[in-house]
Structures are given as structure tokens and as C-alpha cells.
Image: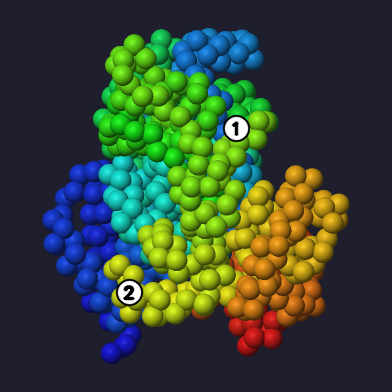
Amino acid sequence: MNQAADNTTTARVQSLRAQLQAASYAYYVLDAPDLPDEVYDRLYRELQDLEAAHPELVTPDSPTQRVGEKPATQFTSVRHNIPLYSLENAFDLAEFRAWEERWRRQAPDAGEVEYVAELKIDGNALALTYENGLLVRGVTRGDGIAGEDITPNVRTIRSIPLRLNTDNPPPVVEVRGEAFLPLDVFEQINVERAERGEALFANPRNAAAGTLRQLDSRIVAARKLDFFAYTVYSGAGNWESEGEREEDPKSKTQNLKSPTSQWEALEFLKSLGFRVNPNRQLCQSADDVQAYYDNWATRRLQLSYLTDGVVVKLNDFALQQQLGFTQKFPRWAVALKYPAEEVPTILEAVSFQVGRTGAVTPVAELRPVQLAGTTVARATLHNADRLAELDIHQGDTVIVRKAGEIIPEVVRVLAELRSDDAVKAAMPTCCPQCNSALVKPDDEAVTRCINISCPAIVQGAIIHWARRDALDIEGLGEKWVKQLVEQGLVHSVADLYSLTEEDLAPLDRMGKRLAEKLLGAIAASKTRPWASVLYALGIRHVGAVNAKTLAQHFPSAAALAAASPHEVETVHSIGPEIAQAVSQWFQVPANQTLIDRLRQSGLQLAADEDQTQAAEAGALVGKTFVLTGTLPTLTRPEATELIEAAGGKVTSSVSKATDYLVAGEKAGSKLVKAEGLGIAVLSEADLLALIGQD
Ligand code: IVH
């Protein structure tokens, strides 16, 4: 079998790869398929077979390398070379004109200028790094300063080239743009989530963000994310200093001279093989921009993806440079937003939802209506105060709004269309789930059920418990939780750990095989660390980050329970409100019983001493590592985890402060830099030996 490939095989693999790359580009970037699906599949399979027989022929840019790898355990944080700025918003044309006046005051000699108007894609910004033409890194925006390295996921996005389309690429190119989920894919994902009883994504942007942060890139590969590029920094362009540019004649690409304007940059991106939004326009004046904005106000609703405005950029890079940036925004660009969409529909009923904290939320059940590209059948009415303010009646015609990030809401009621006998909607006095009296403190907007055995609260608590970032119980979705609670099998999260196959198998559509699987996932959650358990308990104000901080300072539930609010508050970033909530929680007898039961079931209610000690006394304490290239067996997150577990630190760029560079195959500029600085370069085997895991 696995013999060295002969020349014919090598040539065939190369030709297959080129054909498939061209077909994929035509399909995903140009939107103009030129190869029937069956032919593509046949060629793809042939390439796959040849690569399986001759693994030495696999290249990182092969179309077969887009399918995702095995799940990562975490993402590493990477500092952006250049921050990802956000954009100043203008909410109408007057604000846009005011923005123009402002930048003109800064550049009074600018005279007539060109603007580039682009659609503002409602997705998630990504920064992609190409070294010597090859995609080496994809990072989320994060807070703009540092994001998460999600390279395996980015590689699954078909419209992102794995290799730049140029024979002579600059050594480093960074491309930025927006990753998004097309509307039909978004709706399909939500249909599937509803079937599995999982919470729905509020909008395509959240769904795209959730997808991009999936640890299992095979799931990402199945989700069909797409990408429009809008910024490029290259050695040959607007990134490095003039001096560096001139020293490196190679950095001039053959197909295009360095862009000197945004319009050219977009053409440049196209020539490199990226998908660039076709609906852009070079505008000669603010009036042109206004016409573009008006034109796309309705046309954008016909697109297969969501947009929430127009991004207007000064075209000339020299002028951009002259204007520069404020703390947060470029002065040379502005986001001219469209108002949130509003549509009328009929209120069919008001229902009341009880959340895991007992908060009762009134929800409008609507006659389904199309809004901002999705079908809306429910909208929040927020709380009792809002309900009273709206004075809403059954059968009312209501105006529903969906603004980018928010779930739909009822903004207005058309009272003039109401019939005389319409019944006014009011908050219930008893819990719609358990019938116990509801409470509404005068100074709070929230109406609450305070019966901790209320099935809605128990259900909510269990769903929170099973979340991926909490105890990560795979498969324990809303559908099962509902049945478990309704059938009286589970009254608190502690009951999950005494469930048996006999309990589960008879549940509707469960069966023996699924029951076994679910029990396995429940048992596996016992190994989740103390910080995750603390978060999973659902104490008010204790989110995942606060839980981690608290678990670091209080190494066990007992230590945290024994701490006074004052002691809790001394922890950096923990405020009095959180400290109070934690102390109060541990004083409730039912919660103390819960902790005891969880301890008896074997959950981690204390930090794993071995782990803490290993990190504190680890072989790598005080050492800083950088990873580069592909390691033979470890993924980057795995290597990072090993280093951190031994007390070391992993950073993203090589500097004098770096102690070791761990280099794998195809190590690029970092290796050169490390060697230049005389930094020790380790192989994976060296690293494992250093940790004592060889
Ligand atoms: S330019 C410094 N162009 O909007 C320049 N951004 O609200 C910043 N966005 O973070 C970006 N479409 O994620 C630019 N055509 C476009 C865009 C766009 C969507 C996003 C981007 C940015 C956010 C700012």
C-alpha cells in the first residue's frame, strides 16, 4: 500500500487539487458553478483516496483539508497585530452629514473626495493571516485587542481561500472581513435545534458567533458559514512602514500593484481569491452616498444574508492615514445604520414564561410575520410595568420590532383598531406552572415565583446545569429535561445522579441506547472542575467568569460557604452585590443539602489539588512559550493545555521575553525570528520530554 508516490500519481494529485480548487472558487466565491456536483464529488473522492494512500502528498491547502479536525479543548487568545476597531454609528443622514463635517474640519484641504459605500454585513469580524500565501491563522474580533484563535473552524469556510491566488505572495498578509450565516442556513439550524429541544438562536449573527466558537470544527464544517472580505494589510500595501516595504521587492504581487485606496483594496482582495460583496459603490460625493443608502434601504431585504446598514469609508488611503483613529474608531469611516424594522401583526394571546430564576416574563404569541428576513411568531413584552404601559388587549394589532441583536419586541399597540369587547392582558397573580403566589417587590420590574420546587425553575436550573460551559452534559436538552421534571423523576440537579436506565428508557422517544448514552454523559460531568460546578449552580450574578475567579480564591465549596460577604468581596473584580448573592445562597438550608448531595454523588466541589499543585510546582513555571507550525500529534489547544498544566504560559508572538518556541511542520516567520533572537526551539518530543510526558 503506502508506497512512495510515483511521478504520475504526484501529477494527478496536483491536477485534481487544482481542478477542485477552481471549481470551489467558482461555486463559493463567484457564485457561478462550473462543474456538476457529481463530477466534483467523483474528483474529490479520487483525491481523497490518493491522499490516503500517499499521506506525504497532503498539503495544507488541499480541498480535503476543510472538513474539520477533532474537537479542541479550548481556544487560545491571540493579540491582534493591529486592533480591530469598531465603527462610529450614524443613525440617519443628518448624522452622516455631521460626521462628514467633522472629518472635514480635521482635513480642511481635502476638497472633493471619493467615498466607498459598502453594505454592513450583520455577522462576526474575522482576522485571517496568510504566511507565504498560506492561511495560517483565523482569529475572532474578541474585544478588538485580542481574539480567539479559531483556525480549524475558519478553514471550513469554503469562500475563504486556504492559499492566496498569487504566485508571488507577500510574506505576510492579513485579511479582515465578516463571517456570516446565510438566512436559509440560519433558519434550518433553528428548525433542527427546535427538534432537539435546544434553545433557538435569536438571529443569524448569534448563530454565526456560536458556530465560530464551536470546539468541534466538524460541526462548523456542516454549518455553511460564508465570508465577505473588506480589509487587507500586506507587506505590499498599507501595513508595514515604507522602509520595510522597499527592502522587500518580493512583496509586490504580480497581479496587482499595492492598493492605495479602499476601492483598489477590494479589487486586490478579489484577485487574491476572496469573496467581496458585489453591492459596493464608489461614490463621488455625500449625495451619492445618500442615494446608495436610500436605494439599499429596501433592496437589502431581498438579500440572502442580513445587513444592518451601510459602511462609508473615505476611499483614499493617504487621507485615511492623515485622519487616523480615535480611541475606538477610525475617523475615516462611519456606519450609517438602517432603522430597526417594524411590522404590524395580530396578538393572538399573551403567555407567561417562568425562567430559571423564577422571573415571569409576559410573551406575545403573534400571528407569524416576516421580519428582517426571519419568521417571528413570539415577542417579548418584558415585564409587568411594560405590559401595563402598553395597555395591550387580546386580538390587538401590534407593531413588532427586531433590532439587530435583540429578540423581537412589541413596541406599540394600535389601540384605534381594537374591538370594544377586547380583554385586557394582565400579569397573573399565581405562577402559571406551580400555582404558588407570585411576588413583585415594588422597587423591581420583575415578577417572580419563589417556590424553589416550581417545575419551571427546576427545568431552567437543569438546563443551565447541563450547558456546555457548565457541566457540559451532552444530549440533555430541553426536550428531555421537560419530561424528567414532568414525570417527577428529577426535582433538583442532584437527582440527575441517581437516574437509572429503567427511569430513562421508557421516556417518549428515548429508548435503551439513548438512555445509556445520556447516563454516560451525566456520569462524565462528575469530572468537571469546581469552577464549572460553581457556575452551574446558577447563583445570581455568578457567571462563568466570576465563578472561575471565585473558584481560584476559594478552593472548595466549603471554603466559599464559610467565607463572609466581606471576605468574598476582597477578591479582585468581585463586587458587593455578587458577594452578597453568594453568601445568601450558601445560607439557604435547601442549598446546603444540595451541596451535600452533590458531594456524595462525586461531583468536584473542590479544586483538583493534583492539578493545582502540578501547575504551581510544574516544570515550566515562569517559562513563556510560543507555538508555530503543525505539531505531529498535538493540536495547538492541546499543546497549550499541557504547557499551562505544567505552569508555563503560551503567548502568540515571539519576542525577547519568549523562552521556547515549539515548532512543527511548516513553521514560518516565527521560527526565523526565534532563531534570530537565539531562542531555544523545541520539537513536540522535546516539549513532552521537558514536561516529563515522553
Ligand atoms: S470596516 C476600521 N466594512 O461592522 C474599519 N466593517 O460596527 C472597521 N462590518 O467590526 C470595519 N460589514 O465586523 C467594515 N463592509 C464592512 C463591514 C464591516 C460589517 C462590521 C465589522 C465591524 C463592525 C463595526
| Quadrant position of the N terminus in the picture | bottom left
| Quadrant position of the C terminus in the picture | bottom right
Q: Quadrant of residue 256?
A: top left
Say what amino acid the circle numbered 2 marks.
Pro
Q: Position of residue 683 (x, y in %)?
A: 61, 78
SS type, badge 1 = loop
Seen at 60% across and 32% down, the residue is 445
Seen at 65% across and 50% down, the residue is 540
Above or below for 80 versus 195: above
Q: Nearer the viewer, residue 480 or 349?
A: 349
SS type, badge 2 = loop
Q: Quadrant of residue 327?
A: top right
Seen at 26% across and 54% down, the residue is 24
Above or below for 335 versus 243: above
| Label whose residue precedes the other's in the sequence (1 or 2) | 1
> Circle 1 sits on which residue?
445
> Circle 2 sits on which residue?
506
Q: Nearer the viewer, residue 287 or 143?
A: 143
Say what amino acid the circle numbered 1 marks.
Ala
Please tell me how crowded label 1 is: few (under 14), some (14-19), or many (20+) other residues with Cα within 10 Å.
Answer: some
